[in-house]
Image (cartoon, grey):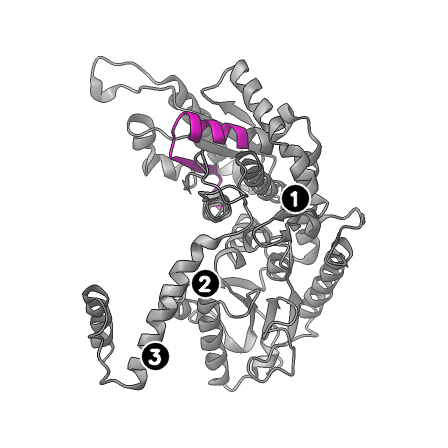
Amino acid sequence: MTLRSLTNGHTVELLLELAKERGATERFKSMISGAIVNPTEGRAALHTAARDFSGTPVTVNGIDVTAEMKRIRDEIREFTKDVHDGRVTGSTGKPFRHVVVIGIGGSYLGTEFVATALQHLGDKSIELHFLSNVDIHNFGAVVSKIDPEATLWIIVSKSFTTAETMANANLAMVFMKDRGLEPERHFISITSKGSPGDNPGSNQTFPVLRSFHMFDFIGGRYSVTSAVGGVPLSLYLGYERFEQFLMGANMMDIHAANAQPEENMPLMAALVGIWNSNFLGYPAQAIIPYASFLAKLAPHVQQLYMESNGKSVTLDGEPLDAKSGVIIFGEPGTNAQHSFFQLAHQGMAFPIEFIGVVRPWYEKYRSLSRGVTNHQELWANLLAQPRALAEGRDNENPHKKFPGNRPSSTILIEDLSPSSVGKLLAFYEARTVYEAFILGINPFDQFGVELGKKLASDIRSRMAMKNSDPNRSFDDLDPSLKFYLEKLFDAET
């Protein structure tokens, strides 16, 4: 990782002293060991245990989490083999050729990132789809691409009550029943023990073929390496590649916990992030991977970081005296250069994180290039942009002047292999956690999403009343809400 930050040696020393004062590395190690690091919910945060192959016991509430994660990995391996070998099929005997993940937020974003990043390794006989938005257009687009008889639906919900996920799941079940198919042969769940979805075969409300468990000590946005990502990614990539992905993530976990502070990549990135937001006042950061297959990285990090660190109070509930979190956005390069880099170079400044891939996967096309290869052309831009941002260029024409002195960082990954993608995923997880530990906030709760859900529930109840009694009015609601609801129902009549 190379930093072109507005810091000097003394600044870095002070930032490292801040990390030491806040006990950042000690807290990170405590997290890995199973300590309660989510005090508002009284929970551990053990996403790292999902990719820990050491066998070292980590006990939470009487559960050996390391052993439990191994048991789940073994279940995923066995189920994947049964599907790939044709022992588990749809209700008409057709082998599964489509896998649809039904989930929202952390139940799909990380999985979609990894699946997209490793699409060149995907099983060509299985297509992976994602049904996340409750928008009916999302459902229609997905079902237009699948063969229902050869489709396995994976419902991902810890509580099995998430409104959007269950609306889509119920829609999918009716869709399958209308085609004479048995849902218990086409649906599996990834859910908590004892949830309404954790009852294979005997659940008459929502029958499923198989359940895999998720736990309250692994939050959704940190759950890619658990069963949440493990089941769909193993079906799509093969279990062996999923395990290679886990091993890469584990390597980064070990680095994040044990590297010397000045050599600890996630810690240094977190410190520079705090410097950029709190001391230099930058409100946003762009993530620009110079690799098309990493297109879903920014949306994943957007949720991971902004939901974790978008807080306004300390662990003790006191007002936070620092800025926490910035706006994360991004687009692959070089596309981003033709989208918002005008702003980056001559408008409002914001730090940019560039990501380069050393070895491309499709080497077989090198011989088709003339002059420089496509990958070399990509790298020419990857190397030029940070330099242009930092150095700028003077010009007597003010319209053509580049002010420069704009911060960036560059991260290189060796290739688009499962191991490299695993390291990249775990880097951003550790960076997010380190920033929170230094700021003294909780990166593992997300109460900010609750109010909107409550208000949506109230509006949903009024909609249901109107559906039951078309003559019911909205006159008792505030004028704005009444206007929009009448507009909606008028369009549906």
Q: Secondary structure at mark 3?
A: helix
Q: Which is more N-terminal, label 2 or label 1? A: 2
Question: Which residue bears the numbered disc 2?
Answer: 132
Task: From the viewer's side, name the closer residue of 424 and 363.
Answer: 424
Q: Answer with the quarter of the image where residue 432 lies.
A: top right
Q: Name the disc covering residue 249, or none.
A: 1
Q: Residue at x 53, y 59 (%)?
A: 107
Residue 12 spot, x, y in % from top left = 55, 20
Q: Answer with the quarter of the image where residue 216 lies.
A: bottom right
Q: Which is more N-terminal, label 3 or label 2? A: 2
Question: Which residue bears the numbered disc 3?
Answer: 464
Q: Secondary structure at mark 2?
A: loop
Amino acid at the residue labelled 2: Ser
| Residue 289 lies in the magenta-colored region | yes
Q: Residue at x 66, y 65 (%)?
A: 213
State which quarter of the image contains the C terminus: bottom left
Residue bounds of the magenta highlight: 270-293
Q: Name the disc covering residue 153, or none.
A: none
Amino acid at the residue labelled 3: Ala
Task: From the viewer's side, name the closer residue of 298 and 397.
Answer: 298
* Mark 3 and mark 1: Cα distance apart in space: 45 Å
Disc 1: CA contacts within 10 A as few (<14), some (14-19) or many (>=20): many
Q: Are marks 3 and 1 in contact (CB under 8 Å)?
A: no
Amino acid at the residue labelled 1: Ala
| Residue 268 lies in the magenta-colored region | no
Disc 2: CA contacts within 10 A as few (<14), some (14-19) or many (>=20): many
Residue 407 spot, x, y in % from top left = 43, 25
Res 106 visible: yes
* Mark 1 and mark 2: Cα distance apart in space: 25 Å
* Mark 2 and mark 3: Cα distance apart in space: 22 Å
